[in-house]
Image (cartoon, helix red, strand yellow):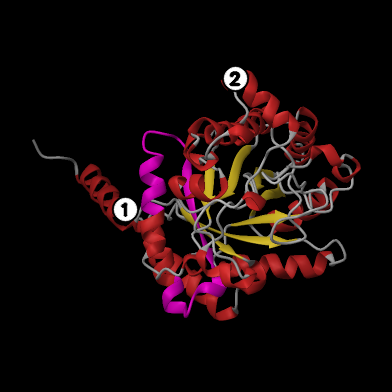
Amino acid sequence: MKLPKLLLFLLTLSLFSCVEKEEPTTFKFGVWTTADPKKSDADYTKEFKKYKDGGIDEVLINTSTDPKLLKRLVPLATKEGLKVHAWIMAMNRPGDSIALQHPDWYQVSKDGKSCFDNRPYVDYYQWLCPTRQESRNHVLNLVEELAKVDGIESVHLDYIRFPDIFLPISLLPKYNLVQDTELPQFDFCYCDECIKAFEKIHHKNPKNSHNTSIDMEWKNFRLNAIKAVVDDAYKIVHKHNKQLTAAVFPYPEMADHMVRQRWDKWNIDEVYPMIYHSFYDEEIDWVGYATKQGVADLEDKKTKINTGIYIPGLKSDKELKEAILLSKDNGATGVSFFDGNALTASNLKTIKETKDGLK
C-alpha cells in the first residue's frame, strides 16, 4: 500500500526533526557567593548577569542567615535567569547573637573546653551542639525562616557536621600540626547533654572509654546526631515546598573519618561534595575519583551529587574544563564553583564553552 504523498512528507519531516533537535543538557552549573547588604541592587544585577552570561545556572547565596536580605536578592537573581539557594552555616554559627547568649549551647571538646570561648583552629569556629534541644531547635528555626522565602530552590546547609577531627593534609603546616591520631582538643562533643544522651542508650560514659577513636558506638552517636538535624531540616523545608541541599566533605567514608559526617545516610535532595583536590595534595583526576565514590555510596537513593570545585586550587582553565568533565563522566548531575569572587573572565569563558560542548 502506497502512503499519500502529504503523509509521507510529514513523516519524513518528523523523523528529520527528531534527528536534528538537540536537547539542552541537564547538567547544571552553580556558584557559591556571599552577600553584602551594603551592595546596591545595580551591582548585584551586574554580578548575576556576569554569572549567567558565563554559563552559570544557579547561585548559592550566604546572607548570614538573613531572610530579609535573601528576599531582596532572589528577584534580582531570578530576573537574570538564575536559580537561588539559601546557603546557611548550620552547626558552626560564628557571631550568632542569639546563640552567644547561651554558653551552654556550644560543643565541648574531649579536654573539656567549650567552643563558646575556646575555639579550635580559628576564631570563627563556634560550633553548636546538635544534641541539646535548645541549640538544635535554634538551627532548625533559622532553616525554616529561610525556607519561607519565596522563589528559592533549596535551603543549602553548610558546616553540617562536627569540627575537624582531622584537617585536610595541606592545611596542617598552616597550624603547625601533626594529626596522626585523634587529638582531644579537636574531638567534640563531650557536653553534659551528649554524655547523658549517650549513657541513656549505651549505659556507659565515653569519657571512661579506653580509646574513643575505636569506640564505634560513640562515633555512631555523633554521626546520628547530625543525621537527626538534617532529617528534621528535610521535613521543615519540604513543608514549605523547597528542597534541602548541603555542602559536604568529598565522599562519605572520608567525611565520616574527618568530621563525623555520613551524608549518604541522610534524608536530603542533593549534596555538593567539596572535592577540593588541592586541600588533600591530590591531582586533578581525584575530582573524578571522589565524585565516583559518592555516586556509588548513593546508589539506589534519590539523592543527587553536584561536585564542588575549588577555583583557586586549579592551575589553568584547562584543569577547570577537565574538572567539569571528570565530574560529569563520574555521575555528578552538576558542578558548583567556590567562589564567585574567584571566577575570572577567562574562567567564565571556559565554563560557558564547556557547557555548550555538552549539548
Q: Quadrant of the N terminus?
A: top left
The residue located at (43%, 75%) in the rendering is 319
On residue 203, the disc is 2
Q: Say whether residue 140 is visible.
A: yes
Q: Residue 18: horizontal and vertical position, in percent? A: 30, 50
Between circles 1 and 2, the one closer to the viewer is 2
The residue located at (53%, 57%) in the rendering is 274
Q: Residue 124: horizontal and vertical position, in percent? A: 76, 58
Q: Nearer the viewer, residue 27 or 279?
A: 279
Q: Residue 216: horizontal and vertical position, in percent? A: 48, 34
Q: Report the amino acid beneath label 2.
A: His
Horizontal side, residue 351 vs residue 144: left or right: left
Q: Nearer the viewer, residue 143 or 210?
A: 210
Q: Quadrant of the C terminus?
A: bottom left
10 Å crowding of disc 1: few (<14), some (14-19), many (20+) = few
Q: Say whether residue 358 is visible.
A: no
On residue 199, the disc is none
* Sequence order check, earlier mark of 1 and 2: 1
Q: Residue 192: horizontal and vertical position, in percent? A: 75, 31
Q: Nearer the viewer, residue 347 or 298?
A: 298
Q: Report the amino acid beneath label 1.
A: Ser
The residue located at (64%, 19%) in the rendering is 200
On residue 17, the disc is 1
- Stretch of the chain drawn in magenta: 291-320
Asked if residue 323 is positioned above or below residue 346 in the image, the reply reads above
Answer with the quarter of the image where residue 194 lies: top right
Mark 1: which secondary structure? helix
Horizontal side, residue 254 vs residue 128: left or right: left
Magenta stretch contains residue 115:
no
